[in-house]
Image: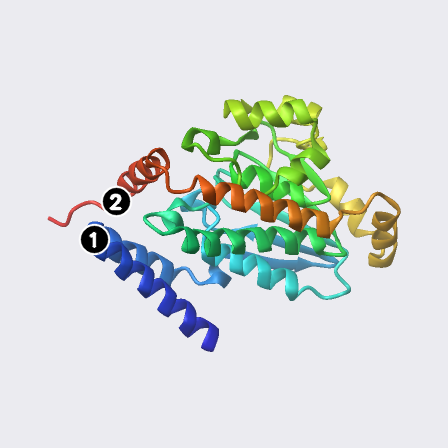
């Protein structure tokens, strides 16, 4: 209850700050209402099937954008996993896996608030990477920005036909606030630079060639995934020991690299170009005027 009350107070404070900075009152109230309705447990659906835990990003009407509530829910879900769980599957509800960070959380905030928001997002990625269980992301539709980087903290990535990846932060004059180390660990450096600097979209076949996905699945999202069925039959201990035999993630190096990336991001966070882009995004999301 204390955590819930603190979160409500933070959301109310953010809504008041938006109003005092000249944001339309309807927009500030809409922000507060939507955030209070979407508790962390509602933004991430967690279910268990045998030794497999399914984490489903559950904001389909927002293209599963990584909000404060969703990132906190992902942290909590990782912390609550039972040792008997062998495999953790990360997926997204609706038409897209994830369209990236929720820019509403970064609208008209100062650098310190932006740091808090993005540190939570980074912490959620690190929690996923640190799990002893095998982590598998199933990707479909758009995987943009943070939605393209989050799966790189998983051990394996499976893609549906038509899945696409992009890193649009460059259009804002930003570099990603985390994940550069994970990109270079999974992808070729020239490809990483191309994606960072061009902001272009990478389709499913190219993603398979480059290693953003390891397998391309069939088109039916409701069909069984035999690959996962095979993994689920392994004992948790065998899976952990097999993962340990491969080159493990260097969590200390990962955290240090992401700390540097966040500092670089914050140096360019509040440019006129970035603020104008976020303002245009928020304007498109503005609720219609009451009759």
Residue positioned most to the front: 267
Asked if the residue at tag 2 contacts the one at tag 1, i.e. Cβ–Cβ closer than 8 Å, the answer is yes
Asked whether, in this view, residue 89 is left or right of residue 27, the answer is right
The spot of residue 60 in percent (x, y) is 45, 46
Asked whether, in this view, residue 121 is left or right of residue 11, the answer is right
Q: Residue at x 57, y 37 (%)?
A: 148
Q: Which residue is mark 1?
A: 26
Q: Residues within 10 Å of mark 2 (few under 14, many from 20)?
A: some
Q: Residue at x 72, y 41 (%)?
A: 156
Query: Is 170 placed above or below 27 here?
Result: above
Q: Residues within 10 Å of mark 1 (few under 14, many from 20)?
A: some
**Of label 1 and label 2, which has the lower sequence position?**
1
Query: Is 51 placed above or below 227 here?
Result: below
The spot of residue 262 in percent (x, y) is 54, 46
Judge whether residue 1 can be spotted in this image: no
Q: Which residue is mark 2?
A: 286
Q: Nearer the viewer, residue 181 or 111?
A: 111
Residue positioned most to the bottom: 1
The local secondary structure at tag 1 comes to: helix
Q: Residue at x 23, y 52 (%)?
A: 21
Query: Is 125 placed above or below 138 here?
Result: below
Asked whether, in this view, residue 282 is left or right of residue 90, the answer is left
Q: Nearer the viewer, residue 94 or 3?
A: 3
Q: Indicate how the structure is coloured in the image.
A: rainbow
């Amino acid at each position: 209850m204390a955590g819930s009350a603190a979160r409500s107070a933070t959301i109310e404070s953010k809504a008041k700050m938006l109003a005092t900075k000249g944001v339309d009152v309807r927009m500030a109230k809409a922000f507060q209402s939507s955030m209070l309705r979407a508790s962390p447990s509602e933004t991430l659906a967690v279910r268990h099937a045998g030794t497999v835990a399914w984490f489903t990003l559950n904001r389909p009407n927002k293209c599963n954008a990584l909000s404060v509530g969703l990132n906190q829910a992902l942290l909590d879900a990782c912390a609550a996993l039972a040792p008997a769980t062998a495999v953790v599957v990360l997926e997204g509800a609706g038409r897209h896996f994830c369209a990236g960070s929720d820019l509403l959380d970064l609208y008209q905030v100062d650098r310190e608030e932006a740091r808090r928001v993005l540190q939570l997002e980074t912490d959620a990625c690190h929690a996923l990477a640190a799990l002893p269980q095998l982590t598998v992301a199933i990707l479909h539709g758009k995987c943009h920005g943070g939605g393209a980087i989050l799966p790189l903290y998983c051990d394996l990535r499976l893609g549906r036909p038509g899945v696409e990846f992009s890193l649009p932060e460059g259009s804002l004059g930003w570099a990603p606030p985390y994940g550069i180390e994970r990109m270079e660990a999974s992808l070729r450096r020239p490809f990483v630079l191309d994606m960072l600097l061009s902001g272009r979209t990478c389709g499913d076949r190219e993603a398979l060639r480059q290693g953003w996905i390891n397998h391309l699945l069939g088109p039916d999202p409701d069909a069984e995934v035999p690959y996962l069925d095979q993994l689920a039959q392994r004992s948790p201990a065998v899976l952990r020991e097999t993962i340990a035999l491969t080159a493990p993630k260097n969590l200390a190096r990962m955290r240090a690299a992401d700390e540097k990336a966040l500092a670089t991001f914050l140096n360019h966070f509040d440019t006129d170009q970035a603020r104008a882009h976020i303002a245009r995004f928020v304007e498109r999301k503005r609720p219609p005027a009451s009759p």
